[in-house]
Amino acid sequence: MSAKAEIEIIERYCKGCAICAEFCPTKVLEMDAFVVKVANADACIACNQCELRCPDFAIKVHKL
Amino acid sequence: MAYDYEKSIRPGKLPHIWCPGCGHGIVMKGLIRAMDTCGLEKNNTAIVSGIGCASRLPGYMDFCTLHTAHGRAAAFATGVKMAKPEMNVIVCGGDGDGTAIGGNHFIHACRRNIDMTYVLLNNHIYGMTGGQFSPCTPTGAKASTTPYGNPDPIFDISKLAIGAGATFVARTTAFHATQIDKLIAEGIKHKGMSVIEVVDDCPTTYGRRNKFRSVVDMMKVLKDTAVPVAAASKMTAEQLEGKILTGVLYQEDKPEYCAQYKQVIARAQG
């Protein structure tokens, strides 16, 4: 499966609340200590849920 | 391209000061999207707030903003709207600011049906001042001033707004991110007082004291307790116990205050 979007993470803004990783339907995101990282980029379905629910403006979903 | 939120935010203001997992950021994003949908411009929009975590919101927004005294946001916003009826006025505030300290101003803004959009972020607590209980702290919940549990019943903000005379009342939660901007956009388009209650989470001063293990747990509770109005009509009172209704709860058309006041001025001038 190829990724439907490219996820950009602005690490300076991320506070590690883990909302994005928890509610990602295809488990693309994972917590790496206190910052989120893209662990499984290919599984992204471009649903935009992580960007919508990030309270810290730290995630940008660029649709491909 | 990803959504460009930063065009609506004052340069250099991010990262914001809200705690990790605080839903206020989600609501702010929703507000930005709603304002874009309605085509509000920076020079014809005033965002007014009082004091509190939620009232920090206008400080980040690159619009005309007014940060006022505790609870007085609705009163100042009424002043802005009366002086410049062509402005789009949006008020942001928390449950403590809006329904306790500013409760009087809130109900009277609703009663007048003045054309403004009140986004009330209900996080069940006074977060910024140290976690004191607010009128929206659930019965039995712990706060810094109710360490043995809060004995008070809660205010239902939406019912209060409807009872006081607001003509557009809607509720959603911070979890339901796409609904936030839809409801706020409907509220902005509505001519009259619109109240959008967003049930929010406060992981730092409310969650920790009330045995929520994490922000994610608080978000799951918001997800599980929200019931859309349409679905609720098919549910029994027992099934609705402890649930919160989401969606547009009330809407009607009534004369708007600025228009009414214009007529008063015309009569006075003969």
Image: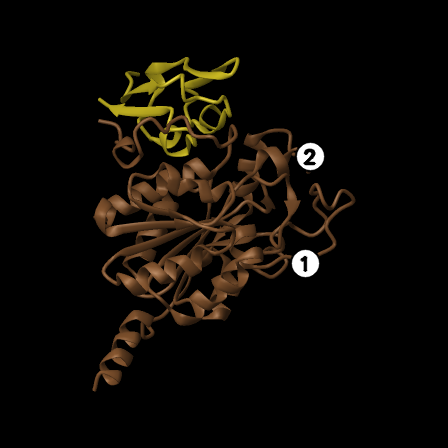
Chain colours: A yellow, B brown
Quarter residue B265 falls in: bottom left
Q: Is residue B248 visible in this depiction of the protein? A: no
Instruction: Identify the secondary structure beneath mark 1.
Output: loop
Horizontal and vertical percent position of residue B230? 44, 58
Image position of B145 with respect to B237: above or below: above
Residue underneath mark 1: B153
Q: Residues within 10 Å of mark 1 (few under 14, many from 20)?
A: few
For the N terminus of chain B, the quadrant is top left
At 24% from the left edge and 46% from the top edge, which residue is drawn? B37
- Amino acid type assigned to the residue bearing label 1 in the image: Pro
Tell me what residue is drawn at x 63 percent, y 57 percent: B154
Q: Visible in this render: residue B73?
A: yes
Residue matched to label 2:
B211
Q: B50 above or below B116? A: above
Q: Which mark is residue B13?
A: none
Q: Is residue B241 left or right of residue B41?
A: right
Instruction: Name the foreground residue: A20 vs B45.
Output: B45
SS class of the residue under badge 2?
loop
Q: Position of residue B255 (x, y in %)?
A: 31, 75
Q: Position of residue B40 (x, y in %)?
A: 23, 49
Q: Amino acid at mark 2?
A: Lys
Query: Residue drawn at (36%, 29%), measured in percent from left and top?
Result: B13
Name the quadrant of the C terminus of chain B. Answer: bottom left
Number of numbered markers: 2
The CA span between labels 2 and 1 is: 20 Å
